[in-house]
Amino acid sequence: MTSERVARLLRDHPLVDGHNDLPIAMYELCGYDLDKVDLREDVPGLNTDLPRLAAGQVGAQFWSLWVPPKPQHEAVRRTLEQIEFVHRMVERYPDRLQLATTADEVETAFRAGKVASLMGMEGGHSIDESIGVLRIMRALGVRYMTLTHNDNVPWADSATDEPVLGGLSEFGEEVVAEMNRLGMLVDLSHVSADVMRHALRVTRKPVIFSHSSARAVCDVPRNVPDDVLTTLTANGGVCMVTFVPMFVSQTLVDWVAEMTAKAVDLGINPNNPTSMQALTEQFGVEPPPATLAEVVRHVEHVREVAGIDHVGLGGDYDGCPDFPDGLADVSTYPALFDALAERNWSDEDLAKLAGGNILRVLRDA
């Protein structure tokens, strides 16, 4: 049950989530056909629909534009199709959703009782090494770009690929400079720590991590090291803590490492989900769940290291199969705020976490 304090706070201050993969989830579910899936109803298999957004008191959402990086020649077209889908989705539900590209537009939509709908492009492969395409995407309303996804791009290293450049190439620096000029937020989720540091050296505007957590709390390459969080303070940017279990729970990460080692010892391919499921059944073990309390630890760690002005939320709903206990879908955001309120967070600090910080960054950009 949401406390009246948190319910009131989220009525007065927009909760802005940095990353939701509903567009690609809708492609996989129904080929973007909004006649087949009605988002006014509870949609099985999704973490996101209009009733649950309302229950979660979500005031603004960055809809993620993610497409597979290969084949590369299709990435630009498929990204444009996702932009078109977001526009159609907003047009289908005009009483519940409203397009936004600025902080003022977010606040206007919020006051009208609608979820402000922004767009963020997930992966530099979506511009196909073209500054011209980058400019087009910004003109179409895309407000941030994640420099890489899980694979390197020719001009930047990913956190989850073999390093090639050790940071950004000269063209990568040009991309960052042009994003600064265009007012497009540089998103450093998914990039290597060296790219994080390099981008923070060359950017002239605040950056974001649209869906990353703290590496000191859960030691995986997708999370943000403390030295980067410290640099983020001077930059003025925001780390939007994600709920992805493998980025949240060190207990789960250690369990997966243990089961992977057992699989290798037994000659089983650890990348084969069916084989790994059989292995866990053989040993009679289940993966430990991530928890809301672990997410709280990440939020508080980012606050401790970077400061209260540099923390936000980017759940990554519809971007992975499972979420922490207590944070199953977009309806559960108030539970996180209740947990923080119980840990003596002030209303002012909760409002900054909810959306105040990312709206400031949008204005700064």
Image (spheres, grey):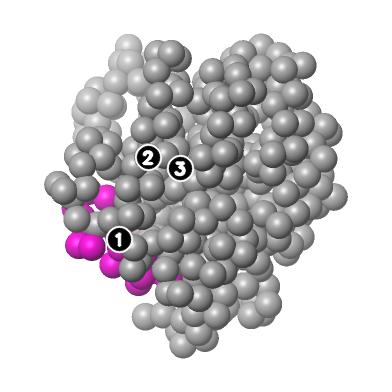
Which residue is found at the position 36% from the left and 33% from the top? Answer: 81
Where residue 93 is drawn, which disc sits there? 1
Number of other residues with Cα within 10 Å of mark 2, as a class: few under 14, some 14 to 19, many 20 or more: few
Where residue 85 is drawn, which disc sits there? none
Question: Which residues are drawn in magenta?
Answer: 40-58
The image shows residue 8, relative to residue 291, as above or below, that is: below
Q: Position of residue 78 (x, y in %)?
A: 38, 27
* N-terminal label among 3 and 1: 3
Amino acid bearing label 1: Tyr
Q: Position of residue 212 (x, y in %)?
A: 58, 44
Where residue 64 is drawn, which disc sits there? 3
Amino acid bearing label 2: Glu
Front-most of residues 311 and 23: 23
Number of other residues with Cα within 10 Å of mark 1, as a class: few under 14, some 14 to 19, many 20 or more: some
Distance from Cα at disc 1 to Cα at disc 2 = 15 Å
Kind of element beneath mark 3: strand
